Amino acid sequence: MADLILLARAQQLPALATVNAAYLANLISAASVAIERWCKRVFLSTAYTDEYYDGDGTDSMFLDNFPVTALTSIVIVESDGTDTTILGTEFDIDEDTGEIRFVRDCTTECYFPDGFHNIKANYTAGFAAIPADLQEACAQYCVWLYSGGITLPTVKSESLGDYSASFGAMADMDIPMPIRRMLAQYRNVRP
């Protein structure tokens, strides 16, 4: 998993300008991992080989990763164990959503047969360069982490007189709402 921003990009924010470079690099990596997990996708362009899907008898399906920049082939694993390879040219592709659909005049059977992990996709998806708003979300998340965000979200309540505190589980920690709003358009909402 690659970092979503460079060190120099993070240091453009005043809150991070003087942070130790090695520590800031760790924050960038942690923020990048958290963002990709929350968004349920990889952002930088990556080649995917033999990524399995379940056929559902329809003429279209959604690939897990997007934007799709190249579809090499789809392999249908037949019930007898043989493979049928269909070239990417047999499909219309919605690059932004990752939906692929057989073209109207396809030369093979134009549907994905019902089955469990009977479809293998070979394709490339992701951004060649991380969009500016996604970079900003990562930089802002680094600021939040640096300012104590790792510990603050677990505090559920505090008192001052005769001090008491109530802490939540680490599972309660999440990306702050303003940053989630910045990332919402990039989140993969498919199951």
Image (cartoon, rainbow, N blue to C red):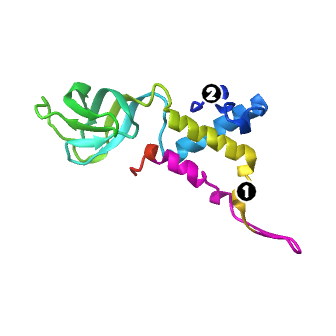
User: Mark 2 or mark 1: which comes first in sequence?
Assistant: 2
Q: Which residue is at a point 34% across and 42% down the rendered structure image?
A: 53
Q: Which residue is at a point 89% across and 74% down the rendered structure image?
A: 162
Q: Which mark is residue 6?
A: 2
- Does residue 111 appear to the left or right of 180 in the view shown? left
Q: Gap between marks 2 and 1, in whole Å?
A: 26 Å
- Does residue 132 appear to the left or right of 57 in the view shown? right
Displayed quadrant of residue 172: bottom right
Displayed quadrant of residue 153: bottom right
Q: Which residue is at a point 76% across and 30% down the rendered structure image?
A: 22
User: Residue 141 appears at what percent x and percent y?
Assistant: 63, 44
Rate crowding at label 1 as few (under 14), some (14 to 19) or many (20 or more) other CA atoms within 10 Å: few
Of the pair 93 and 131, the residue shown nearer to us: 131
Amino acid marked by disc 1:
Leu
Q: Residue furthest right?
A: 162
Residue under numbered circle 1: 152
User: Residue 2 appears at what percent x and percent y?
Assistant: 57, 30
User: Residue 76 appears at what percent x and percent y?
Assistant: 26, 35
Under circle 1, the secondary element is helix
Of the pair 61 and 66, the residue shown nearer to us: 66
Magenta span includes 183: yes
Under circle 2, the secondary element is loop
Q: Residue furthest left?
A: 105
Q: Which residue is at a point 24% across and 47% down the rendered structure image?
A: 114
Magenta-colored span: 158-184
- Does residue 4 appear to the left or right of 107 in the view shown? right
Of the pair 104 and 146, the residue shown nearer to us: 146
Magenta span includes 50: no
